[in-house]
Amino acid sequence: MPTASARHILVESESECEELKNRIAGGESFADIAKEYSKCPSGQNGGELGEFSQGQMVPEFDKVVFNDELNVVHGPIQTQFGYHLLETTSRND
């Protein structure tokens, strides 16, 4: 079964998500922004979600984590929890 490692930032609005994505693209640290802005407890660990198997996360995450480019910040991705920036840091098929 495929596994992956990823990190994310969870915020309440799409506009805030876009703003944070632009700040990361401008050179700010993903981990620092996660610690300051993410509404998920993982934010305190720089947004790190650790390693997980396909199917363990919500479908919107799986679609990005197991298909899209590695080490690129994707988003905003909307789930029932809010809006996410998501970066897949490794993947094993």
Image: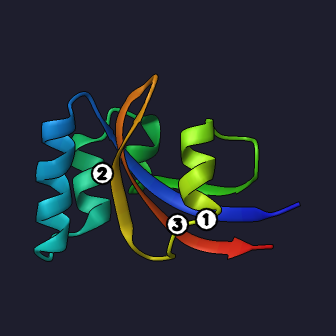
Q: Position of residue 59 (x, y in %)?
A: 62, 39
| Quadrant showing the N terminus | bottom right
Q: Nearer the viewer, mark 2 or mark 3?
A: 3
| 77 relative position to 64: left or right | left
How far apart are the two marked residues, 2 and 1, measured between alpha carbons? 23 Å
* Residue annotated with mark 2: 34
Q: Nearer the viewer, residue 17 or 31?
A: 17
| 83 relative position to 54: left or right | left
* Residue annotated with mark 1: 67
> Pointers 3 and 1 in contact (CB under 8 A)?
no
Q: Residues within 10 Å of mark 1 (few under 14, many from 20)?
A: few
Q: Residue at x 54, y 41 (%)?
A: 60
> Pointers 2 and 1 in contact (CB under 8 A)?
no
Q: Nearer the viewer, residue 39 or 55?
A: 55
| Quadrant showing the C terminus | bottom right
Q: Nearer the viewer, residue 90 or 39?
A: 90
Q: Position of residue 81 (x, y in %)?
A: 43, 25
Q: Residue at x 33, y 32 (%)?
A: 39
> Pointers 2 and 3 in contact (CB under 8 A)?
no
Q: Position of residue 7 (x, y in %)?
A: 47, 57
| 34 relative position to 56: left or right | left
* Residue annotated with mark 3: 88
Q: Residue at x 38, y 57 (%)?
A: 46
Q: Residue at x 76, y 63 (%)?
A: 3
Label 3: which secondary element? strand
Q: Nearer the viewer, mark 2 or mark 1?
A: 1
Q: Earlier in the sequence, mark 2 or mark 1?
A: 2
Q: What colour-coding does the image apply?
A: rainbow
